[in-house]
Amino acid sequence: MKIAIIPARSGSKGLPNKNIKELCDMPLLAHSIKCAEQSELFNEIFVSTDSQHYADIALQYGGSVPFLRDEALAGDTVSMWDVVREDLLKYEAIGKTFDSITLLQPTSPLRTPDDIIAVHRIYQERQADTVVALCKTDYAPGVCNTLPENNSLNEFISSNLQNKQRQELPDYYRINGAIYLMSCAYLSQTTNIYGTDSYAYIMPKERSIDIDDEWDFLMAEAIMEYVKSKKAVL
């Protein structure tokens, strides 16, 4: 049994109500529901929310919401994995258990069903505990730094990097938030999901936008519209 969990709390400081904001004719969270459906991998597509209004929208687009998130787990400082553990316990209480959980953040609407399928393939082939989606960073850490109060650039870039071309620097990657897959048994016994048997799935930059503010939203919308126009021409 496989469950997809889409965490969609109602509070958002950077972009109010972003999880239900209309993106290309659908609420943001609906894109993740539809993506999970199209992968044809899941027995349950659960939207974890503290809001009945959000739950009603999720149900309208095919999500499952058998219960709401506890108010104590609805804050912006609460661990996402604590929320997931509580969700799984609540499912157990109504007689449903799962072998694996795939977390799909609604703020990553540009992932595709093929991305989800590929993550599950790695999970099976590697017999992994976890598989997490990453993308390449725009800049290596060596060319990034903090600034003092006077904005001095003294030693901003280390001397061994000053004469190197960007192409000479190694590739670095970041977690893009689009997909996390792990066994429920592993999640129940660890606080570190990045262990020995954890593996990366690399996604391209254009599918790795994680919406946090209005600018991110506009970028996601522009890319989505561009992709739709290209498909219409083919």
Image: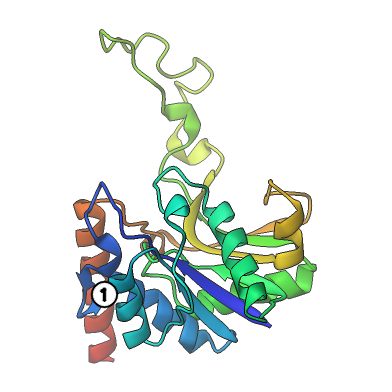
Quadrant of residue 95 in the image? bottom right
**Quadrant of image for the C terminus:** bottom left
Camera-side residue: 162 or 104?
104
Q: Residues within 10 Å of mark 1 (few under 14, many from 20)?
A: some
**Residue 201 visible:** no
Q: Is residue 22 left or right of residue 147?
A: left
- Give the quarter of the image for residue 126: bottom right
Q: Position of residue 101 (x, y in %)?
A: 63, 70
Q: Is residue 40 above or below residue 175?
A: below
Q: How is the image coloured?
A: rainbow
Decide: is 78 above or below 85. above
Three-letter code, disc 1: Pro
The answer to whether residue 101 is visible is yes
Does residue 175 sit above or below 54 in this rendering? above
- Residue at image position (60%, 75%) is 118
Q: Residue at x 40, y 16 (%)?
A: 156
Disc 1: which residue: 27
Q: Position of residue 108 (x, y in %)?
A: 39, 64
Front residue of 76/69: it is 69
Q: Nearer the viewer, residue 171 or 81?
A: 81
Percent across and percent down for residue 122 are: 69, 70
Left or right of 82 in this view: 113: left
> Dot 1: what SS?
strand
At x 42% / y 11%, what residue is drawn?
155
Give the mark count. 1
Point out residue 121 in the picture as x, y percentages from the top left corner: 68, 76
Give the quarter of the figure containing the N terminus: bottom right
Front residue (pair 171, 175): 175
Q: Quadrant of residue 2?
A: bottom right
- Residue at 52% over, 85% down: 39
